[in-house]
Amino acid sequence: MEEIQFRSIMEQYDQQKVLDIFDSRDEKDKERLLKQCDFLDFSFLSALQNHDGKRGEITPIRTMKLPEIEKREEEFRNIGTEALKAGKVAALVLAGGMGTRLGSNHAKGMYDIGMTKPVYIFQRMFENMLDVVNETGAQIPLFIMTSIINDKETKEFLYEHKCFGYDPKQVHFFVQDMSPCIDIEGNIMFSKPDEFAMSPNGNGGFYSSMMNAGLDEFCRESGIEYINVFAIDNVLQRIADPVFIGATIDSGCATGAKVVKKVDPGEKVGSICLEDGQPSVVEYYDMTDELLQAKDEDGEPAYDYGVILNYLFRLKEMDGIVRNEMPVHIVKKKVPYLAESDTSETGFVTVYPDKPNAFKLETLSLDFVRMMGSCLPFEVIREKEFAPIKNPMGVDSVESARKLLIAAGYEL
Ligand code: UTP
């Protein structure tokens, strides 16, 4: 990025402190900082100026529950299988996250959850996909979203493991954009004298980054109409599930969202709902007592179904959604930062905080559910499809996922 453009962006977002620090740096540092700006999306900073955090009116949405799905399973399976065989469905794994809670220095998919033999998270994903390839005989293109931090190691790892038996011709990588990290006063942070602190711009960045990589065009040319977007860290989920795909196509909705019955109303998953009449997801921290106690027309808890980050999106509607329309979420996290130091030769040290000290700016794929206008919430059996790995121990951890995998008959 040219210096003049950088200055203008910093002024636009009231970043005078950053300009002062920039001016104090030598020419080499300045050059590196400007180079980094080429892949940093500063437009996310507008969220700091416009964020009011207000939500619309939340009301219940009808979920397609297990008994109805069981009754129509064969019909849905046939529709989904036909779509898969016709090459209309691709899968997209969100693998650009930092996995900070898990605490590994590598891409989350490279994490080994095996006990008596190596079982990598990526391996679980490919094995799950191969189940569908073998069942349907369809070839399913897989898009892997990485970040500039883990792109190289992810490619090397999957190359080394030969994509765990998945056809490499069906695998396409793309890299998501980064957004700057902000301190609590709203200033962009530095992680080194010549580097801004930055993080991947959230799992909602997938469509704009796909477009930057020309993959939306690839989908159109290849006749792909639906994308099954899912998180890397749920090691039990069914991917490109013909029954889910068939039910969503049959419903005519632009999106389908796999949901599970929550273990308790306060569980830390987003609840599927309507917001001002549009399908939406209300995050657990936005659930008021009133919402927690509300009942639906059957007298059941109204917001009892949580999303598991496994969505089917119809591409036709996605094309109309441009990146700038995505709401930016402000999330408090731990971000290493640069501090002045009298004892260090350079005059600086990088500090690794032990509690959240900064804000990351992220878009979330759940916002596509609202923006696409229609959604089929589709219940899946939690013990068969929900084993997320967020932490090393405790809730949603390597430990809990291992138990669920073993109970589901997998060898680890
Ligand atoms: P999480 O929000 O749980 O983040 O991501 P994370 O990176 O796995 O873990 P923490 O919060 O740092 O501990 C849910 C899914 O979205 C992906 C993750 O890789 C995971 O599959 N993701 C997240 C991205 O692809 N890009 C992002 O910028 C953020």
Image (spheres, rainbow, N blue to C red):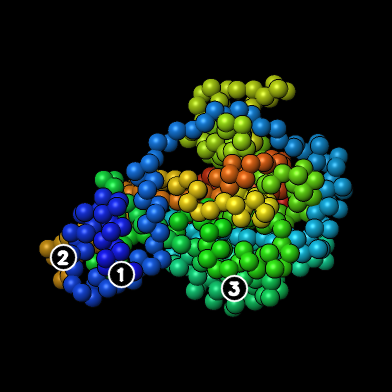
Q: Residue at x 50, y 48 (%)?
A: 326
Residue underneath mark 3: 158
Is 132 in front, or is 277?
277
Could you tell which of marks 1 and 3 lies nearer the N-terminus?
A: 1
Q: Residue at x 44, y 67 (%)?
A: 149
One can see residue 41 in this view: yes
Could you tell which of marks 2 and 1 lies nearer the N-terminus?
A: 1
Kind of residue at badge 1:
Glu
- Location of the C terminus by quadrant is bottom right
Kind of residue at badge 2:
Ser
* Residue 184 vertical placement versus 345 (above, below): above
Label 1 neighbour load within 10 Å: few <14, some 14-19, many 20+: few
Q: Residue at x 35, y 54 (%)?
A: 181
Residue 275 quadrant: top right
Label 2 neighbour load within 10 Å: few <14, some 14-19, many 20+: few
Residue underneath mark 1: 2
* Residue 138 vertical placement versus 246 (above, below): below
Question: Gap in Å between the C-alphas at discs 1 and 3?
Answer: 36 Å
Question: Gap in Å between the C-alphas at discs 2 and 1?
Answer: 18 Å
**Residue 24 numbered mark, or none:** 2
Coordinates of residue 257 in the picture (x, y in percent): 66, 45
Q: Residue at x 55, y 26 (%)?
A: 291
Position of 300 compared to 199: left or right? right
**Residue 208 numbered mark, or none:** none
Coordinates of residue 133 in the picture (x, y in percent): 77, 65
Is 186 in front, or is 223?
223
**Mark 2 or mark 1: which is in front?**
1
Position of 62 compared to 199: left or right? right
Could you tell which of marks 3 and 2 lies nearer the N-terminus?
A: 2
* Residue 341 vertical placement versus 374 (above, below): below
